[in-house]
Image (cartoon, helix red, strand yellow):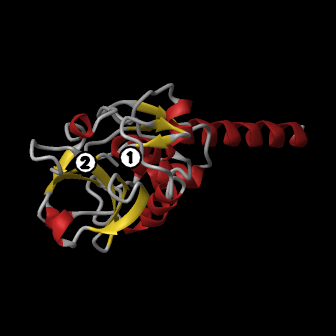
Amino acid sequence: MNALRAMILTAAALIGSSALAATYTVKPGDTLYQIAQKASLDPAQLLKLNGLSSSTIQVGQKLNLGGVGEGTATSVRNIPATPASHSGNGNTVRAAAARFLNIRYVLGGSGAGGIDCSAYTRAVFQQLGVSLPRTARAQFGVGSAVSRGNLQSGDLVFFNTLGGGVSHVGVYLGDGQFANANSYNGRTMIESMTTTYWATRYVGARRVL
C-alpha cells in the first residue's frame, strides 16, 4: 500500500511540474528571442513548437515551451519586461552572422551562388528564429526604432547608399562593428560603422530581437 501511494505521489508531482512548465504567457515587453533564451531553447525551436512563421507575438499569448523543467519555468516567468542589456546575446548574434561571411555578393541573389545585403540579414536572422522581409526597405519597417546611441548586438542598421533613401542593411555586432554583404568588396564581411563612408550614409536602426 505504501509503495502504491509513493508511486501515485511521484506521478502527481511529475505531472504538476510538467503542467507548470509547459507554457508561458507573453507579458508586455517580451520578445520571442528573450523567451527562447530564458527557456534554454533556440528561437527556431520555439517557433516550431508553436507553429509560428515569424517572431511576432502578442501580449497574453500562450507559448508552448516543450515541457522544460520547473527551474526553467521559474526563470522564464521572471523575464523582465524591458531588458537592461543585450550583451548576453552578442555571442549568439556573432555566431549567426559568421556562418554567412565571405560569401560572394550578387545583386538580387539569395542562394549558394551569391547573396545581397537583405538576403544576408534574412539568412542571419533565420538562424535566430526571426523571419524578415526580402528587401532592405521592407526590413526598415519591422521591429522598433533604435537611436544610434542605444544600438545593441543584433539590431538591424540601415544606410542610404544610392541617394534615394534606405538601400542597404546590415547586422550590428557591437563596438561599432556590423556585418553586411558589401557590393564594393564583393563579399559578406564585418566592417566598422565609424568609417566616413558608412557614418555619413547611416539612416537608422530597428530592433527585432
For numbered disc 2, what is the local secondary structure?
A: strand
**Residue 92 sits above or below residue 132 on the image:** below
Q: Is residue 126 above or below residue 87?
A: above
Q: Quadrant of residue 18?
A: top right
Q: Which residue is at the front of the view, 106 or 189?
A: 106
Q: Is residue 20 visible?
A: no
Kind of residue indicated by mark 2: His
User: Disc number at residue 68?
Assistant: none
- The residue shown at (46%, 62%) is 94
Residue 108 x %, y %: 37, 35
Q: Residue at x 51, y 25 (%)?
A: 51
* Residue closest to the eye, 47 or 195: 195
Instruction: Identify the residue at horizontal 15%, vertical 50% (top origin).
Output: 160
Label 1, secondary structure: give it. helix
Q: Which residue is mark 1?
A: 121
Residue on which the image places disc 2:
168
Answer above or below: position of 61 versus 98: above
Position of 80 compared to 205: left or right? right
